[in-house]
Amino acid sequence: MKKKLADITLVTKTETKIDSVWVSNIGQTESFIIPYRDTIKVSFKENLNDLYNVFFILTMVENQNNFG
């Protein structure tokens, strides 16, 4: 039986200045750091999981405003 591989598409709309996005499967055996765009497609080589990590990395200016 052929296994389904994971393809994730993230669509975002924000005024926050985002630098990049880190996406990984829950076991962190595959991970990607991708420059931010409003639509991002990530293709994993592993089977489809039901849980993924997604972190938005803010630009330095935005970080300084939020964290002092």
Image (cartoon, rainbow, N blue to C red):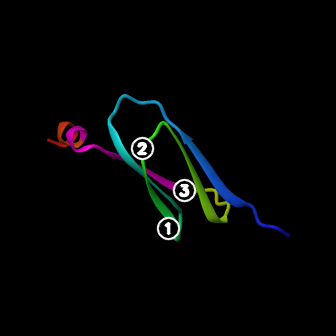
Which residue is outermost to the right? 1
Please identify, in this view, whether the residue under mark 1 or under mark 2 is nearer the observer.
2
The residue segment tinted magenta is 53-62
Nearer mark to the viewer, of 3 and 2 = 2
**Helix, strand, or loop for circle 1?**
loop
The residue carrying mark 2 is 36
The amino acid marked with disc number 1 is Gln
Residue designated by label 3: 52
Cα distance between the residues tagged 3 and 1: 9 Å
User: Residue at the location (63% across, 56% down)?
Assistant: 50
> What type is the residue that disc 2 sits on?
Tyr
Quarter-of-image position of residue 48 = bottom right
Residue 27 or 22: which is nearer the viewer? 22
Tell me which amino acid carries mark 3. Answer: Tyr
Q: Residue at x 41, y 30 (%)?
A: 14
Give the position of the N terminus as an image quadrant. bottom right
Sequence-first disc among 1 and 2: 1
Q: Residue 41 at x, y = what percent?
A: 57, 48
Instruction: Give the labeled residue for mark 1.
Output: 28
Please say if the residues under marks 3 and 1 sit with CB atoms less than 8 Å apart: no
Q: Is residue 46 left or right of residue 55?
A: right
Secondary element under disc 3, as helix, strand or loop, is strand
Residue nearest the observer in this picture, 46 or 68: 46
